[in-house]
Amino acid sequence: MAAIYEYTGVVEKILPVQTFTSGFTKRDIVMTDDVGQESKWPNHIAFTFKKDNCSLLEKVREGQRAKIRFAIDGREWTNPQGQVKYFTDLTGLKLEVLNADGSSTEPVPTPAEPDFPEDAGDVDDLPF
């Protein structure tokens, strides 16, 4: 199981969806550092959302702060000349748009009431 990481930053660019002949789709988003001040050398980090996850980028706009949950994926490829190349992807899994104070713009779900039957008995009746 791959480790899941988080990155919080500012959306710099959202690229169009790419569809390949196999039917595979992907969409990239470029984020920059979220350090609270202009940086002379900001990091530009591209994350790739694949297949159904491409639709997650519909709710975010350039200039907004966002938090991305992602996995690091790597693969090996041998070109026709026999040279081996390695690729690393930051695969986006979830995107959350943030308010200026860093809080989520998505509503927090209300926890459901526990579903205990009325006649469940007293806790003292448990066998342990």
Image (cartoon, rainbow, N blue to C red):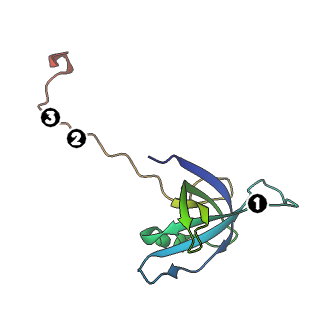
Residue picked out by circle 1: 43
What amino acid type should be assigned to the residue bearing mark 2?
Answer: Asp
Residue 111, x across and y down, in percent: 37, 45
Residue 53, x across and y down, in percent: 46, 67
Mark 3 neighbour class, 10 Å CA radius: few under 14, some 14 to 19, many 20 or more: few
Q: Position of 86 compared to 37: left or right?
A: left
Q: Reading the chain from its start, which is encountered first: label 1 or label 3?
A: 1
Q: In percent of the image, x 44 and y 84: which residue is there?
A: 21
Mark 2 to mark 3 CA distance (whole Å): 9 Å
Q: Quadrant of the C terminus?
A: top left
Callouts 2 and 1 close, C-beta under 8 Å: no
What amino acid type should be assigned to the residue bearing mark 1?
Answer: Asn
Q: Is residue 74 above or below residue 26?
A: above
Residue at the outermost left position: 119
Given residues 30 and 96, the one toward you in this image is 30
Q: Reading the chain from its start, which is encountered first: label 2 or label 1?
A: 1
Q: Secondary structure at mark 3?
A: loop
Residue picked out by circle 2: 115
Residue at the outermost front position: 81
Given residues 64 and 87, the one toward you in this image is 87
Q: Position of 114 compared to 34: left or right?
A: left
Q: In percent of the image, x 66 and y 68: which residue is there?
A: 30
What amino acid type should be assigned to the residue bearing mark 3?
Answer: Glu
Which label lies toward us, 2 or 3?
2
Q: Is residue 116 above or below residue 57?
A: above
Residue picked out by circle 3: 118
Q: In percent of the image, x 47 and y 76: which residue is there?
A: 25
Residue 96, visible in the rendered structure: no
Residue 87, x across and y down, in percent: 60, 62
Q: Position of 84 compared to 114: left or right?
A: right
